[in-house]
Image (cartoon, helix red, strand yellow):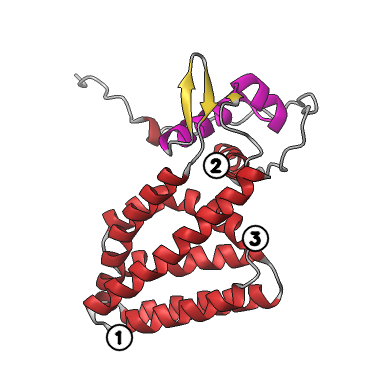
């Protein structure tokens, strides 16, 4: 006689097809939703950008039904997006809705304190574990940053910047370290976008990243720690200045 059936974990169940019925036009413009990318990811990306650039001010209430209508999706992806943003500390539960809390300067400094702890170790480990991967990925990202700077494309520059730093987490060989970084990378990506859009010295940043890569490839743990700390301290101040600019706008 067969034993009791064990329920499959939710992640193993097939994803139900999303409804494709037409939704009333949103009352405010929203970024176009692409069906080949998870809808919850797209909604969270759009809301995250609006929170960090000030389009959704602190205190704004986010209601599932209104957001679903605005983005032209069902409530499920919106619910997923709100949970993601709550996990990132950008919104908090407020009754049956969520309220925007955003990031203040204290939050940015805490994020960078965490990032320094992670990135110093990631770069030290990557330099000894897989220097060839560090060199290849770092040089490719710097080439993309240089091209973006020459094209005056801050969005492309921010993407290449994130790829540059993410390469060291991948090359570190520590999957858990990489997972912690990936929990924060979406927020940093938006902060980079905000900063680079206001930065007219992207070509200088290219040179700074070249110098950072050279130090990491040098393999001296103390030199890596000092260079990464200095690099992140400068980046933190640029982001705080950009945040102040956005808050005054």
Kindly indicate whether the residue at mark 2 contacts the one at mark 3 (C-beta within 8 angstroms).
no
Query: Which residue, given by chain and number where applicable, does mark 3 sit on?
Result: 198
Check the picture and name the quadrant holding the C terminus: top right
Q: Measuring 47% from the left and 63% from the top, which residue is drawn there? A: 235
Q: Quadrant of residue 228?
A: bottom left
**Left or right: 104, with 177 as reference point:** right
Residue 1 visible to the viewer = yes
Between disc 1 and disc 2, the foreground one is 1
Measured in 3D between alpha carbons, the distance from the residue under mark 1 to the one under mark 3, in whole angstroms, is 32 Å
Residue at 43% from the left image edge and 82% from the top image edge: 211
In space, the residues marked 3 and 2 are separated at their CA atoms by 26 Å
The tally of labels here is: 3
Q: Specify whether 147 is left or right of 160.
A: right
- Classify residue 51 by image quadrant: top right
Residue 36 shows in this picture: no
Q: Position of residue 163 (x, y in %)?
A: 49, 66
Indicate which label's residue lies in the foreground, 3 or 2: 3
Q: Secondary structure at mark 1?
A: helix
Give the main secondary structure, helix, strand or loop, of the magenta stretch: helix
Judging by the rendered image, the residue that carries numbered circle 1 is 218
Mark positioned earlier in the residue sequence (1 or 3): 3
Whether 115 is among the magenta residues is: no
Q: Is residue 207 left or right of residue 228?
A: right
Element class at badge 2: helix
Q: CA distance from mark 1 to mark 2?
A: 38 Å
Which mark is first along the chain, 2 or 3?
2
Q: Helix, strand or loop at disc 3?
A: loop
* Residue that badge 2 annotates: 41
Residue at the location (60% across, 26% down)?
60
Residue 66 lies in the magenta stretch: yes
């Amino acid at each position: 006689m067969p034993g009791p059936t064990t329920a499959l974990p939710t992640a193993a169940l097939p994803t139900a097809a999303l409804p494709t019925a037409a939704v009333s036009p949103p009352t405010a413009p929203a970024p176009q939703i692409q069906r080949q990318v998870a809808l919850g990811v797209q909604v969270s990306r759009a809301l995250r950008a609006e929170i960090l650039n000030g389009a959704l001010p602190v205190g704004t209430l986010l209601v599932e039904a209104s957001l679903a209508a605005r983005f032209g999706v069902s409530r499920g992806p919106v619910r997923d997006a709100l949970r993601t943003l709550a996990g990132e500390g950008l919104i908090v539960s407020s009754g049956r809705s969520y309220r925007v809390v955003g990031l203040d300067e204290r939050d940015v400094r805490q994020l960078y304190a965490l990032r320094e702890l992670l990135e110093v170790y990631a770069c030290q480990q990557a330099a000894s574990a897989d220097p060839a991967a560090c060199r290849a990925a770092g040089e490719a990202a710097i080439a993309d940053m240089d091209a973006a700077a020459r094209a005056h494309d801050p969005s492309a520059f921010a993407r290449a910047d994130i790829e540059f730093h993410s390469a060291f987490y991948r090359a570190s060989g520590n999957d858990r370290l990489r997972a912690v970084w990936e929990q924060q990378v979406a927020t940093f990506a938006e902060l980079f976008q905000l900063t680079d859009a206001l930065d007219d010295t992207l070509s200088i940043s290219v040179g700074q990243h070249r110098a950072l890569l050279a130090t990491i490839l040098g393999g001296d743990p103390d030199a890596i720690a000092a260079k990464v700390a200095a690099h992140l301290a400068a980046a933190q101040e640029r982001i705080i200045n950009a945040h102040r600019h956005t808050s005054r706008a």
